[in-house]
Amino acid sequence: MSKKKKKKTSKKTPKPKFTAKTADKHALYQLSVQDADYEVGMISRIFKRLRGRKALSVREDFCGTALFCATWVKSDKQRTALGVDLDPGVLQWGIEHNLSPIGEPGNRVKLAQSNVLDKVPGRSDICIAFNFSYWCFQDRPTLLEYFKRAKQALVDDGLFFLDAYGGYESYEPDLEEPRKIDAGFTYIWHQDVMDPINNHVVNHIHFEFKDGTKMRKAFTYDWRLWTLPELRELLLEAGFADVTVYWEGADEEGEGNGVYRPRKSVTNEAGWVAYLVATP
Ligand SMILES: C[S@@+](CC[C@H](N)C(=O)[O-])C[C@H]1O[C@@H](n2cnc3c(N)ncnc32)[C@H](O)[C@@H]1O
């Protein structure tokens, strides 16, 4: 199971020469695992289909470098975004590299340095928690509290989008999966610890460069691997009225085609990433 892959490359990626000494880990992360254009398109389409109107405001929990927020406000001149993250360093990186460079749309992004468990004022059309970040909450009461907060952050016809990964390979400890990135380096998803008694997982992201240098443990995630039924039950317990799983379709070779559709039942696969959409 590899952490989320970029779905498609919308623009030609410049090819700077990366080495462990000079590369910026946040830039490498964005190039490896985020495809904000794809995700903005997908959630906009789902919201329009379910709510019959255009979504204008988004709250990105665990926003990190706020790449999604920046992409959201660039996609429409009426759109606004609120990014929430604990870490002032990563927020500052996002201001310098993702928000300031885009000019006016960047002024429509607000960043809150806050714990997502704390009350952050405002209500949005959409709340997202992507790249499994909410898995840092490893017990039911804490995840339930977070889901209640997410519900409070939505307008009456809002939608909460989350992602989850799974599949039988996600239960394998000590698994390293390298993937070559177009920009000219290798990304490695490392499932280090997997304890099936409590589903505690520790995962790392490493980067390797063409000059032979390495950046080991650029990022480490101490998570609980939550299953889809557990997430559905907790979302309903938090007061959401309905939870739908969006599952990725396959192309002729059986590879994921980047098209997610609502599904009630599927056959398990080696590794998958799914989206959940919760309606208040
Ligand atoms: C994996 S990054 C996610 C980046 C981005 N949202 C993405 O989709 O790739 C996780 C982020 O969650 C933040 N974080 C962890 N616990 C948090 C909490 N309780 N409240 C707010 N942010 C938190 C970290 O500072 C980090 O920037």
Image (cartoon, rainbow, N blue to C red):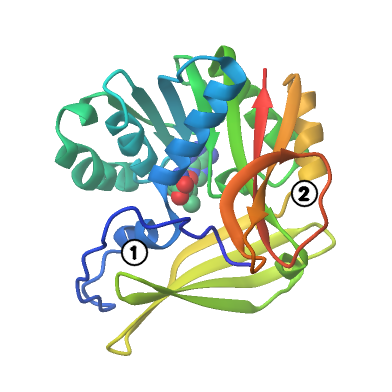
Q: Which mark is residue 162?
A: none
The correct choice, above or below, for 149 with respect to 4 in the image is above
Q: Callout 2: few (<14), some (14-19), or many (20+) C-alpha neighbours within 10 Å?
A: few
Residue 28 got which mark? 1
> Which residue type carries mark 1?
Leu
Q: Residue at x 80, y 57 (%)?
A: 198
Q: Residues within 10 Å of mark 1 (few under 14, many from 20)?
A: some
In this image, 106 relative to 157: left or right?
left
Query: How many numbered circles does the render carry?
Result: 2
SS for callout 1: helix
Tag 2, which secondary structure? loop
Looking at the image, is 261 positioned above or below residue 4?
A: above
**Direction from residue 153 to residue 199 in the image, left or right:** right
**Residue at 52% across / 28% down in the picture?**
127
Name the image quarter holding the C terminus.
Answer: top right
- Can the viewer see residue 116? no
**Label ID, residue 227:** 2
From this view, report whether residue 6 is shown above or below residue 159: below
Query: What residue lies at 30% left-to-right and 85% top-to-bottom?
Result: 210
Q: Quadrant of residue 143?
A: top right
Distance between the alpha carbons at the discs numbered 1 and 2: 28 Å
Identity of the residue furthest to the bottom in this view: 212
Q: Amino acid at mark 2?
A: Thr
Residue 84 image offset from top left, x and y in percent: 42, 33
Residue 11: percent from the left, percent from the top?
28, 55
x, y (%) of residue 125?
A: 50, 18
